[in-house]
Image: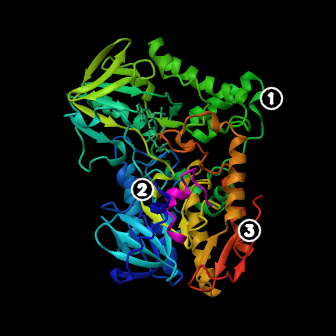
Amino acid sequence: MAAAATHRRTTTPEAAVTGTYHVLIVGAGFAGLYMLHKLRGLGFTARVYDAAGGVGGTWYWNRYPGARCDVRSVDYSFSFDRELQQEWQWEEKYATQPEILRYANHVADRFDLRRDIRLNARVESAHFDERLGRWIVQMSQGDVISAQHVVMAVGTLSAPKLPEIPGIETYRGETYQTQKWPHQPVDFSGKRVAVIGTGSSAIQSIPIIAEQAAHSTVFQRTPNYSMPAGNRPNDPAAVAALKANYPTYRQAARDSFFGVPIEGPIKMAVEVSEAERTAAYQAGWDAGDLVALVGAFGDVLFDKAANDTAAEFIRNKIRAIVTDPAIADALCPCDYPVGTKRPCLDTRYYETFNKPNVRLVDVRKTPIAAIAPAGIRIRQGDADEEIAVDAIVFATGFDAMTGSFTRMDIRGVGGVALNDEWAGGAQTYLGLAVAGFPNLFTVTGPQSPSVLSNMMVSIEQHVEWIADCVAYLRDHGYSTIEARREAQTAWVAHSNELGARTLYPLANSWYMGANVPGKPRVFLPYIGGVGPYRQKCDEVAAKGYEGFTLTRSSHPTDTPTREVSAHAT
Ligand code: NA7
């Protein structure tokens, strides 16, 4: 893109404005809902816009068969309201998508949020008007909002991605995307179904699709590490005991590494006997708990030799479940460490490949040549084989963590596009703000714990931090806040340095941006731990928003009235 075009100012005329708010919130998922509630409580006017036809964010869209959360329901829920967390009864250990969506709707009703939420309205552009010191946000249905602050509560896995396969548009059968599943149940009975992808969504949906379909073909590019969820109805007595202790329990989650209150590992896998290691991994496997297995020892995510022991434990499980050794071999991940791509929880995933009407196509050995009008063509040596299918399910993931931002036209000071700002890789200060984009907040943004944590804990932390910040500005007479570039650079360097100490960079994962052709290879989430990260954010606020520039003037190019320097630690 030409530099001139890049820096072009395209601000929507002020005259077009249809509504004025203190805060415009983009997204009606859990982050947007809580943000609205919190801001209202502080006396701000706020409005939420969402492209979806309902609230719930990721849980509105991802309604594929078998969709469920792989953080326990008692953990993956709001803690900000005592009555809400006491009264809501989760049915299962891991909540299903319909149950989570019911919960999101319950939250919207319980706190009377709907009157400030506009649905079926996609944000097309958000431009910072320096003259006004305000954001002018243009919606797809025609609304134009002027807001002092914009909170991007857009989710981390909300920009769906289709595969780059030639001929995809020529296919004449039914197509589905896990990330945009129809609202009516899909009946695959008697059909030949292809599933492309073996990430979390595929692993959850394949066993159910294969139960129904006459024949299923799974196209796998990278095998995943998965373990049985051991899902079951919640035990009322156990839940009551936990709820009696909820305040302490929730605080432990906030102070923990991943946002779930488990005791940190105290031993290293490479320092204990094989028997002790196996027993620890088996305990995690039996508990159906990802963090318990991958986090059983302190070195699994940091030391390749330690990781190999956990990876081999899972591979042995796969070999024991899958009866055909060649299929088992193809399902065994062996070229990246366990935990460095999102590991999965499943219900009879590996068992599904023992069925005679399920075929695994390893696209590394037999690549997909093209999608044809009646099926999928794979390359077998010099020849092509066409696998005829009645339906294709694309379970091919997302442009994670940045796609939901870069698909909007966001322009900050000088008309600079966020897309250009992030062309070399996303950069934020604390995962909360971007230099050059005043009064714009990014909930669970890049360089915050985000996808490496229990999202509910991270969402609550960010929402509360942002609400406190906006109130601080108002109460101290400031009109704008902007991350300072040097603070941002230091934070990104710190985040990268922590990432480089782990095994994450060894995998081609969406954590690294590797699933999107041309996306810069940058480790996007922050791996310093939820508790320490919270402490850092709190310190920044306590020091009067260290690392940000706060201005009293509505004109951000004026000499700042206040600057607070920062050094990432
Ligand atoms: P993921 O985890 O990004 O999985 C996408 C899958 O699609 C993954 O197996 C990809 O293989 C595969 N993929 C993508 N493009 C292709 C092509 N062209 N050919 C074959 N296979 C392809 O998304 P999910 O929706 O499953 O899960 C997202 C998150 O939701 C999950 O991590 C949890 O946090 C919940 P690859 O691994 O890139 O080789």
Name the residue carrying label 2. Answer: 407
* Place of residue 345 in the rendered image (x, y in percent of width and height, measured from the top left): 50, 37
Name the residue type under label 3.
Glu
> Which residue appears at 52% of the width and 78% of the height?
130
Name the residue carrying label 3. Answer: 539
Q: Nearer the viewer, residue 329 or 454?
A: 329
Q: Nearer the viewer, residue 72 or 440?
A: 440
Q: Which mark is residue 135?
A: none
Q: Nearer the viewer, residue 288 or 160?
A: 160
- How far apart in space, not on screen, are marks 2 and 1 (Cα)? 47 Å
Name the residue carrying label 1. Answer: 271
* Place of residue 276 in the rendered image (x, y in percent of width and height, measured from the top left): 73, 27
* Place of residue 208 in the rendered image (x, y in percent of width and height, measured from the top left): 34, 34
Q: Would you say 558 lies left or right of 532 here? A: left
Name the residue type under label 2.
Arg
Q: Which of the two marks, 2 or 3, is nearer to us in this view?
A: 2
Ligand 1 lies in quarter: top left
Q: Quadrant of residue 120?
A: bottom left
Circle nearer the N terminus (2, 1): 1
Magenta part of the protein: which range?
Answer: 413-428
**Secondary structure beneath label 3:** helix
> Which residue appears at 37% of the width and 81% of the height?
19
Above or below 398: residue 321: above
Name the residue type under label 1.
Glu
Q: Quadrant of residue 65?
A: top left
Circle nearer the N terminus (1, 3): 1
User: Would residue 424 be counted in the magenta stretch?
Assistant: yes
Q: Nearer the viewer, residue 363 or 262?
A: 363
Q: Would you say 262 lies left or right of 222 here? A: right
**Secondary structure beneath label 1:** helix
Q: Which of the two marks, 1 or 3, is nearer to us in this view?
A: 3
